[in-house]
Image (spheres, helix red, strand yellow):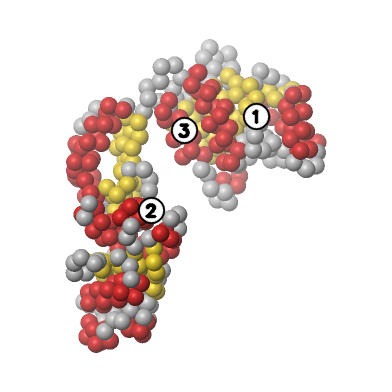
Amino acid sequence: MRTALINTGTELLLGDVQNTHLAFIAREILPLGLRIDEQRTVPDGVAIREALLELFSRAEIVFVTGGLGPTTDDMTREIVAELLGLKLEQNAELLAWLQHRLKTRGFKWTARIARQADVPAGAQILLNENGSASGLYFRANINSQSDSPHLFLLPGPPRELQPMFRKSVMSILRAIVKNPTALDRRTYRIACVGESIIEEAIGDKVLAVEGIELGYCARPGEVDIRIIGEPDEVARADAIIRDELGFSIFSTNNDTLEEVLVKLLAERKETIAVAESCTGGSLAHRLTNVPGASEVFVAGYVAYANAVKIDILNVDRKLIETHGAVSEPIARGMAEGARARARSTYALATTGVAGPGGGSPDKPVGTAYVALASPDEDSIVRRLFFPTDRETFKDLVAQAAFDLLRKKLISDL
């Protein structure tokens, strides 16, 4: 069944509020074999009418979010009622429910709030247990269509829409969708491998599986692979992806790389420290964002100045004078110094030239070194080159450092 989504609200188009409804609704309806085939975002007002008229001509299910509140810019129910030739009627039960709800929560009753009890004739009310704007469901009988679209009007705030969708909308959809063709969706996260390299490795083979949909989403230092299809098709594609990419896959459940590291270290009862120069605390920041990081993260040192590298991390001054702060020996010395000072199982270190100045012919802007100090072998150092802006450079170097540790941990399993 073709499904469409209309998000209303001038605040969305101004960029004042992030629109999360597409991602949420798309995930919820996928197990029913439904996809969002089309999405529109329109300002408050009559633009809703134009979008509905267009989508009613080709969609069997239409979701509309927003515009159900008490203020003058909340016009969705009035516009829909006028478009469909339905009379707005005050629902006594809904009115009483609203009055009781506001009274028990200590809010003042106003005539504006009473608007939210106005319901188009024949609509099913979807109570809002997290706000005052109830949702509505009805068949949109327009121009005497024999097969009228199913229309859902839903509140705009995600904290109100999402519980209502799971509790009320999904039960209606299950009744609408007869014998659904269940779709399965899987995501594979890959670190530090280019999108084109991944495509070359798996693209043709995965797309040879009939009925499979393959997509990619690239971010700094990371690529997500997405497959969608019927369960048997997805299982065949899954086997191909795992066979071709193997340990390059760090997550299949949307975990971040730092979340994976915290879990691996916790399982092994091991610890990590970090010594950062060019990443400026990014590694420590990302690790400490993960719940449970206190079990594995011992210390972080932002050794930006050479004096700190020498005094805190015990890096040999002569090595800096000979090789420079951005070099393999210094990265190694920082990692080993951090591990020794923190008494951690492992330590990561980063040093590099973020730019825009500071580069040289042999170490141009974008050059970086990451190092890993371990208890059982010589430190591992990797030279990297990311000629980009400072923020992206820091993200890429941090991702490379984390993936270096991940590969060390899984190679020991």
Q: Nearer the viewer, mark 1 or mark 2?
A: 2
Q: Using a 10 Å C-alpha cutoff, classify the residue at mark 3 as few (fewer than 14 neighbours), some (14 to 19) or many (20 or more).
A: some
Q: Nearer the viewer, mark 2 or mark 3?
A: 2
Q: CA distance from mark 3 to mark 1?
A: 19 Å
The residue shown at (29%, 53%) is 191
Question: What residue is pinned by disc 1?
Answer: 127
Q: Amino acid at mark 3?
A: Glu
Image coords of residue 405 (percent x, y): 28, 60
Q: In front here: 142 or 217?
A: 217
Q: CA distance from mark 1 to mark 2?
A: 37 Å
| Horizontal side of residue 108 vs 316, given as left or right | right
Q: Quadrant of residue 303?
A: bottom left
**Residue 203, can we see it?**
no
Q: Is residue 288 above or below residue 157?
A: below
Badges 3 and 1: C-beta atoms under 8 Å apart? Answer: no
Image coords of residue 346 (percent x, y): 29, 65
Q: Quadrant of residue 242?
A: top left
Badges 2 and 3: C-beta atoms under 8 Å apart? Answer: no
Q: Amino acid at mark 1?
A: Leu
Q: Is residue 201 above or below residue 170?
A: below
Element at badge 3?
helix
Question: What residue is pinned by disc 2?
Answer: 259
The first of marks 1 and 2 along the sequence is 1
The residue shown at (61%, 36%) is 155
Q: In front here: 42 or 28?
A: 28
| Horizontal side of residue 90 vs 223, given as left or right | right
The residue shown at (47%, 27%) is 3
Question: What residue is pinned by disc 3?
Answer: 28
Q: CA distance from mark 2 to mark 3?
A: 24 Å
Q: In front here: 177 or 43?
A: 177
